[in-house]
Amino acid sequence: MLEVRFEHRWRWIPFSITRLRQARSTGTPTGDSARGARGPFSPSLHEVPGGYGPYCEAVATSARVSKGEAAIEVDALTKSFDATVALDHVSFDIAPGNVLALLGPNGAGKTTLIRILTTLLHPDSGRARVAGLDVHRDAVELRSMIGLAGQFATVDELLTGRENLELVGLLYHLPRAEYRSRAQSALERMGLTGAANAPVKTYAGGMRRRLDLAASLIGRPPVLFLDEPTTGLDPRTRNDLWTFIGQLVVEGTTVLLTTQYMEEAEHLADDIVVLDVGHVVAQGTADQLKDQLGGDVLEVRVLHPEDLARAAELVSPYGDAPVRVDVELQQLRLPVKGGAEVLLAAGRMLEDNGVGLADFGIRRPSLDDVFLALTGHDTEPRAGDDVTARRPGRRD
Amino acid sequence: MTTSRREGLVAVTDVAAQRLNTRAIELTPWLALRDVKGVTKRNLLRIVRTPQLMVISIMQPTIILLLLRYVLGGAIRVPGLNYVDFVVPGVFVQAVLIGGMTTAVALAQDLQLGMIDRFRSLPMARSAFLTARSLADLCRNVLALVFVIALALVVGFRFHSSFGACVGGVALIILFGYTFTWIYAAVGLAVKDPQTAQVAALLPMFILFFASSAIVPVATMPGWLQPFARNQPATEVIDSVRALFEGGPVVHELWQALAWSLGILVVFFAVSLRLYRRAAS
């Protein structure tokens, strides 16, 4: 059995992209202050010989993305597979250097959208531009501007980690010396040097995912697509990846990621697009989406698990959306309007019926609440099942 | 929405915008060749690291050869030739046809596991991936053929013509095996599933090998089968190779064999490339 040692561990601390970005924008990009601000993290791409960006650093003679234009523009994209509509007139923009999360359950069309934007699939109608390049007309040029990390680690099992990265570097048309040094620094950055010369089939799931991400970064693409980057990973590895993605954003990478996890979208993304069965049901910042719910959430935690169902029944008339029941936490959540009055009335009702309460109050809605209100998926009989479906996903 | 909503992020946004305007490297024929070389190396590494597959692809023609030489061979009389000299060219051709089946399986595997998605999202030349597959399988085919030739010599097969003609015959077998790789590539990309690919790839091999002049002379077959058996590509190639190994007139069969090979190559290169471009796993 292969033993894997991590060369340097990423700090496992709560971290904020905003803070890092501010550190970067106040100091000179290569100055000590900026470097100091990134102290806890591994050496960034800027300190690697060769810099970042596709190997040919020259700026195009006429800028494809002029000031104020979007890095990714999606305009009325539509795609069907036989009778199934995967995407129905989906539109949104991503500003340069921003992170946009496509949020939605399995089958929402997230992967289809990523496949269209990475030139793997042609849309039936609509238009999409990435880095100012049309996904259909300029596909060849576009491919050198993007990186793609899939939901399923698309690395070669029989090759070693290093061989995988060097092959991808070669196919980005980097000179040999360049792709070798980039592969080495990517392995270091991902904490994979110990396993660099072992076949990928001996890697654990998280290591494989990191290698896949490293492969998508070898070309130092200005636009990165991540299809459910943390699905099926343990919280520790997921946090590592979040830290890492944040780091890339600080370096000026524009990121489009798909996720089923509200927490992930809230943590990483500037903007969130909620997709459901091929439709955009909402878009905006996490805060805007929460405001859209137009109210608060009544949260009830019962003392005795057997009271849970009865409590749900009792409070449901006070809400304007169905009650969500979390059996594990012995908790109910119910979107309400009316604040204190509702709180008092519901509290009285529970007390009169002898339901013992561990916790009771009005909270600001979470993204989960918003998602439920928007898509109405809770109407399915799934008591106790968090609708964000925290289990390994399938490709949609 | 065209500007970042967050305060104090102008520098990052500017860096991001600047990066978006970097120029892509133009894809030159030299770079396309380099892509082919890189992916061929990957495929060869995969072959070397799954020796059991290589062993099986050598064992199949070995068994066929021993079967025909020692089990069935005694009952078959071919006028004017030792049966071993008659049947061995067919076994050689069968060896490269069997070897090609792994092309279909390997491509279906790459499709299913998402490797083809990875390659198609990279700025590499579109034709490089399939070309590299065919070249790696060519190397494996040559190796398997060398082994089968050595075995044939052990069980009594002999070359009877000039050295040049024999080399020509072996070259023709290799060429035919290479062109067939492209049929298998199309099969693998069309069925998209390794298990199905394995079964699907057996079909053309079976039909072409058994309904040919490989095991028995075409003249012994029923009348309705003869036109197919006489004119199908495997027969043309086997007849040419037999003539090249035994000495004698070859020009007619040779031209037909070369025409078949070239035709298959052109048609299935185009078909495979089209399937690869549209591949959706």
Image (spheres, grey):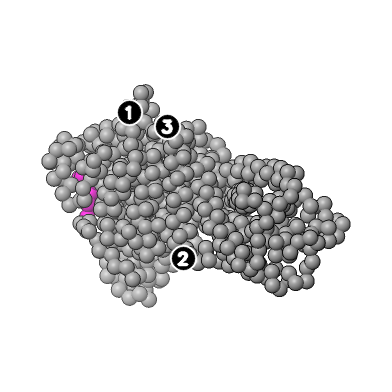
Residue in view at x 33 percent, y 63 percent: A234
Q: Residue A82: horizontal and vertical position, in percent?
A: 62, 48
Q: Which residues are magenta?
A: A13-22
Query: B11 and A296: which one is in front?
Result: B11
**SS at mark 2?**
loop
Mark-to-mark CA distance, 2 and 3: 53 Å
Query: A172 and A84: which one is in front?
Result: A172
Mark-to-mark CA distance, 3 and 1: 14 Å
Q: Mark 2 = which residue?
A: A382
Q: Mark 1 = which residue?
A: A59
Q: Mark 3 = which residue?
A: B26
Q: Residue A293: horizontal and vertical position, in percent?
A: 37, 49
Q: Does A4 appear in magenta?
A: no
Q: Is residue B172 above or below residue A300?
A: above
Q: Is residue B261 visible?
A: yes
Query: A27 and B2: which one is in front?
Result: A27
- Left or right of B16? Residue A85 is right
**SS at mark 1?**
loop
Residue in view at x 36 percent, y 27 percent: A60
Q: Residue A171: horizontal and vertical position, in percent?
A: 41, 43
Name which of mark 1 and mark 2 comes first in the sequence: 1
Name the chain under label 1.
Answer: A
